[in-house]
Image (cartoon, rainbow, N blue to C red):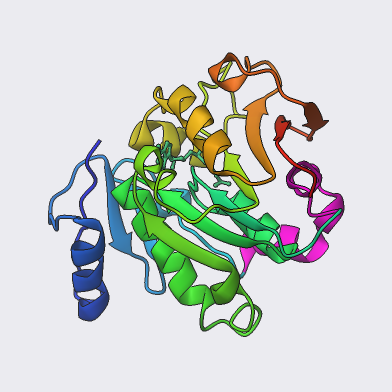
Amino acid sequence: MSIAISPSAEFPAALLQQLQQDFGLSVQADALGWYLCWNGEALVLRHTELPKQGDVLVDFCSGTAAWRRKHGGGKSEAIAKAVGLNKKSGLTVVDATAGLGRDALVLASCGAKVTLVERNPAVAALLADGLRRAAVHPDTADWLPERMQLVFAISHQALTELAAPDVVYLDPMFPAREKSALVKKEMQAFHQVVGSDEDADALWPLAWQLAQKRVVVKRPGYAEFLAGQKPTMQVEGKNNRFDVYVKAAL
Ligand SMILES: C[S@@+](CC[C@H](N)C(=O)[O-])C[C@H]1O[C@@H](n2cnc3c(N)ncnc32)[C@H](O)[C@@H]1O
């Protein structure tokens, strides 16, 4: 699905131009369905038939992500254990399916240096805007920019070109089992905007080739292994499991 930016008088002109240039996004005044727009402070993904409260944005400084960063389990969170941040700090991670950057933020706030690779132009633009705000926010300005870096690219290609990190992290879209209120609005937006990542199996051998220490794959508890590959170990999270493929000791 191709997403356009809806222009408005309030949209900072330089930012609008930058987003068009960096992510190849078009500007369209009368977009229908999902579109990107300016909410006064941030770039948001909005739907013409949903209220503004349904806006999807990347917010590393306040809201759920910041709460989790300040009060969450930190290095004892399942994702941090799966990546190995409970054993070794300062690991380098390529998050090859960055999405809205929530997992990357948890890893970065545990000390990892994360390269976020995202191929969807609208999602990459939301990430770039979240990083832009985090770079000037008093809670994050002094550490986040040096620990989170965005690469707008297709990981099938990027994983053959990037410098080898300690860990490659994968969280491709997986079809939700049931359509209930539990399937959050963000996930619904995501499914409609980015589709179902049906080419995800091909990421596994590339990730294994590039990672120096391990590959970590986030899956719903009921999902089969990515590319049919049996992991070395598994770490159970609250809503997901992390399949860990160990290549070398941390
Ligand atoms: C389930 S979401 C990831 C959510 C993310 N872990 C988070 O915490 O917000 C999957 C994302 O990976 C992206 N993606 C899937 N395959 C990709 C690929 N080959 N290259 C780059 N991005 C990819 C999709 O566009 C989507 O935004």
Quadrant in which the N terminus is drawn? top left
Q: Is residue 250 above or below residue 69?
A: above
Secondary structure mainly formed by the magenta segment: helix
Task: Please indicate, yes or no, whether residue 56 appears anywhere in the rendered image.
Answer: no
Specify the quadrant of the image occupied by residue 72: bottom right
Give the residue displayed 53% in from the left and 37% down from the top. Answer: 209
In the rendered picture of this protein, how many numbered marks are placed on residues? Answer: 0
Q: Nearer the viewer, residue 206 or 95?
A: 206
Going by the image, does 89 lie left or right of 174? right
Specify the quadrant of the image occupied by residue 239: top right
- Residue 212 in the image: x percent, y percent? 64, 46
Give the residue displayed 50% in from the left and 51% down from the top. Answer: 100
Going by the image, does 248 lie left or right of 103? right
Bounds of the magenta span? Answer: 62-86
Going by the image, does 7 lie left or right of 231? left
Task: Please indicate, yes or no, whether residue 77 appears anywhere in the rendered image.
Answer: yes
- Residue 54 in the image: x percent, y percent? 45, 48
Q: Is residue 174 above or below residue 53?
A: above
Is 78 one of the magenta-colored residues? yes
- Residue 74 in the image: x percent, y percent? 81, 58
Give the residue displayed 37% in from the left and 73% down from the top. Answer: 40
Q: Nearer the viewer, residue 7 or 103?
A: 103
Is 198 one of the magenta-colored residues? no
- Residue 139 in the image: x percent, y percent? 66, 80
